[in-house]
Image: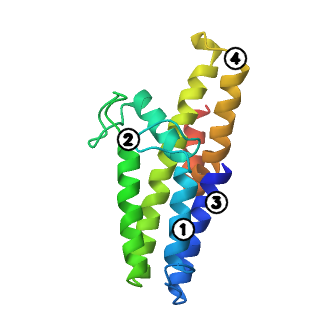
Amino acid sequence: INAWIYSLYELNSAVYKCSIGNTADLTGAPHAWDEGWAFYAGSLQSEGGTDGYLGYTLAEKRCTNFQTCGSAGTSGESADRPSKVNRDLLSYYNSGLAHLQAAECADANADLDEIKKLMTVPLVQGTMKYAYYCDPAYGNEGAEACAEGYAFAAAVLPVVDALCDSTAAATIKSNMIP
């Protein structure tokens, strides 16, 4: 949760630095943007591998579970890497960096909006996987699986809450309860 949020903090900081004219490579927007990628990928990550510990690795691990590996995002084969999410994220990170270096702040912010969406995908996938592994109705029990599911849910539920319309939620709730 912390690295994911800190990655977004750095990306938002980059867009802000751009908006105030600080586009110097070593101290300004591009540097903060690079830090955003670093906190997403981590220092141990190899391209398409599962040897790291941060968001990039999570997307690689979940792509085999949800068949979102490969350039089309339709493969569940571990050899078909990197995942579609990581391919798309790297494309938006590179695009955002180029926009920041050109002082095109609004375009970098648009890239950031797409990055936020894509970074959420592995968290949702992790929540779903461990909710299943934790559900005793399917013969899946275990404190470790439940703890992992809780950690993923703690990361993704605030995002879901921010995106949900309270009026729509009330309508759904009223239709579910007789």
Residue 72 rendering spot, x and y as whole percentages: 26, 42
Q: Secondary structure at mark 2?
A: loop
Amino acid at the residue labelled 4: Gly
Q: Quadrant of residue 106?
A: bottom left
Closer to viewer: mark 4 or mark 1: 1
Identify residue for label 3. 6
135 up-or-down from 128: above or below: above
Q: Residue at x 60, y 57 (%)?
A: 162
Q: Secondary structure at mark 4?
A: loop
Counting other residues with Cα less than 10 Å from the Cα at mark 1, is it few (<14), some (14-19), or many (20 or more)? many
Mark closest to the chain's N terminus, 2 or 1: 1
| Whole-number angstrom distance, CA of label 4 to CA of label 2 | 28 Å
Q: Are marks 4 and 1 in contact (CB under 8 Å)?
A: no
Q: How busy is the neighbourhood of tag 4: few (under 14 within 10 Å), some, or many (20 plus)?
A: few
Residue position for label 2: 83
The residue shown at (43%, 78%) is 100
- In depth, the one of 87 and 68 nearer the eye is 87
Cβ–Cβ below 8 Å for labels 1 and 3? Answer: no
Residue type (three-letter) at the residue carrying disc 3: Tyr
In the visual, does 24 lie left or right of 142? left
Residue position marked by numbered label 4 in the rendering: 142
Q: In this rendering, would 46 be left or right of 152?
A: left
Image coordinates of residue 120 in percent, x first then y, are 51, 49
| Percent position of residue 148, x then y | 66, 31
Q: Which residue is mark 1?
A: 11
Depth order, front residue of 167/155: 155
Work out whether residue 14 or residue 174 is closer to the camera in this orientation and state it: 14
Marks 2 and 3: in contact by CB < 8 Å?
no
3D distance between C-alphas at marks 3 and 2: 22 Å
